[in-house]
Amino acid sequence: MTRADDLRDDLVARIDDTGFGAHGLHVRVGDDVAIHRWTPDAREEIHSVAKAVAVLAVGIAVDEQLVSLDAPVSDLLPAAGDVTLRHLLSMTSGIDFPYSETMMTDWPDLAAEFLSRPSRGRVFQYSNASTYSALHVLSQRVGDVEEYLRPRLFAPLGLDDVSWRRCPNGRVRGGEGIALRTDEMARLGLLIRDRGLFEGHRLVSAGIVDAMHAGWVDTGGATDGYRRYALAGWDGPGAAWRLHGAHGQLLVFVGDTVVTISADDHVGADAVTAFIAARAA
């Protein structure tokens, strides 16, 4: 039995005891892997885990000196003022644009609508419109973001046929809209754990990956795991940090451990994450 096997078995027992609606589990500890499924393997929407893909897209473009994280984007989107890609990806533009299920269809140009609204200063305001706007900015430099990523990220990860859902204007949604199998999401987790390296090849610089769990901003959140946010990453609970999509799509990082979960259980995800953080520490 490996450490990965032990952690998997503990997680399976915990999930079965609590009734958490997990579909698939992938545990990596060091080089060891252990998996478990509760439902047939299928691609599922990863929701806000896609925000990490958006960060990687921008990071690759930064590596290629096509964009800057910290320069104002007003030359590409005049309505943006002094907003930067870092502001957009860390949800600190301060622009208030609450989530709605029709966000992608209500506006002829969501990025322009978002960036033209009043700002409360550089305070945290979580919104899919922020990530969407960041990738709209990126597209001004790289063209279609999905096609830009295909040879640089998707193909090296073995995700050649992955597609990103789009808004009515044909732009990738940014903060959602990618469907992956559990093991495919786990490849993304391995790339992030290994700071931009995958199977010996560097896909993105270590600095952009590190920024997913560094330079934290205060969210005003009241509970552990929601008090600090970086570039797509949430700090906590405990010693962990995580990428957290709606309905329990999780990549939880603790040292050399990455736990990947596909699920359909929004309410139960926090308790499962806390158990992973405590058990893997």
Image: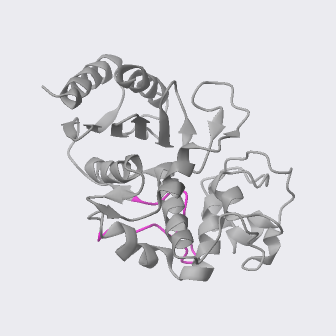
Range drawn in magenta: 160-178
Up/down of 126 relative to 71, above or below? above
Q: How many marks?
A: 0
Residue 164 counted in the magenta span: yes
Q: Is residue 212 left or right of residue 105?
A: left
Q: Residue 126 or 206: which is nearer the viewer?
A: 206
Instruction: Using the rendered view, name the quadrant where residue 78 is placed.
Output: bottom right
Coordinates of residue 113 in the picture (x, y in percent): 76, 67
Residue 146 counted in the magenta span: no
Instruction: Using the rendered view, name the quadrant where residue 153 is placed.
Output: bottom left
Q: Residue 230 or 184: which is nearer the viewer?
A: 230
Coordinates of residue 209 in the picture (x, y in percent): 49, 53
Seen at 42% across and 20% down, the residue is 278
Up/down of 166 relative to 50, above or below? below
Q: Is residue 63 left or right of residue 152?
A: right
Up/down of 182 relative to 141, above or below? above
Coordinates of residue 241 in the picture (x, y in percent): 50, 36
Seen at 25% across and 52% down, the residue is 42
Q: Is residue 58 left or right of residue 82?
A: left
Up/down of 40 relative to 171, above or below? above
- Placement of the C terminus among the 4 image quadrants: top left
The reply to whether residue 146 is in sight is yes
Coordinates of residue 239 in the picture (x, y in percent): 49, 27
The rendered magenta stretch, by its main secondary structure, is classed as loop
The reply to whether residue 173 is in sight is no
Q: Residue 54 or 67: which is nearer the viewer?
A: 67
